[in-house]
Amino acid sequence: MIIPVRCMTCGKQVGGLWDNYKQRVEAGESPAKVMDDLGLERYCCRALFLTHRDNLKKVSRFRV
């Protein structure tokens, strides 16, 4: 639902990069270029960003 704070494979901190990545990709930049600029060079970190789906708005409708 929410991007993990650290990469599950290598342990690099990636949670703080998600908002910047999302804004730049929505503005029309290439995802590969944005990830290079943010310092995401490992395959595991890139896969985490490319496969992440933000479902927080859908889940937040329900009460616990």
Image (tube, rainbow, N blue to C red):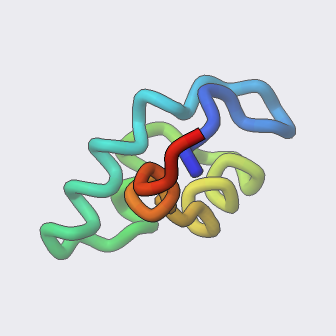
The reply, left or right, for residue 17 in relation to residue 23 is right
Rendered image quadrant of residue 5: top right
In the rendered image, the vertical position of residue 29 relative to residue 49, given as above or below: below
Q: In front: 23, or 33?
A: 23
Identify which residue is drawn at 58% across, 51% down: 1
The reply, left or right, for residue 50 in relation to residue 22 is right
Residue occupying the far left of the picture = 27
Identify which residue is drawn at 28% across, 43% down: 20
Q: In front: 43, or 5?
A: 5
Q: Where does residue 4 sit, x and y in percent of width and height? A: 63, 36
Identify which residue is drawn at 73% across, 56% down: 43
Q: Where does residue 22 sit, x and y in percent of width and height? A: 31, 56
Q: Where does residue 60 sit, x and y in percent of width and height? A: 44, 50
Residue occupying the far front of the picture = 63
The reply, left or right, for residue 23 in relation to residue 48 is left
The reply, left or right, for residue 9 in relation to residue 1 is right
Quadrant of the drawing holding the C terminus: top right
Identify which residue is drawn at 67% across, 28% down: 6
Q: Where does residue 44 sit, x and y in percent of width and height? A: 76, 51
Q: In front: 16, or 56?
A: 56
Rendered image quadrant of residue 17: top left
Count of marks placed on residues: 0
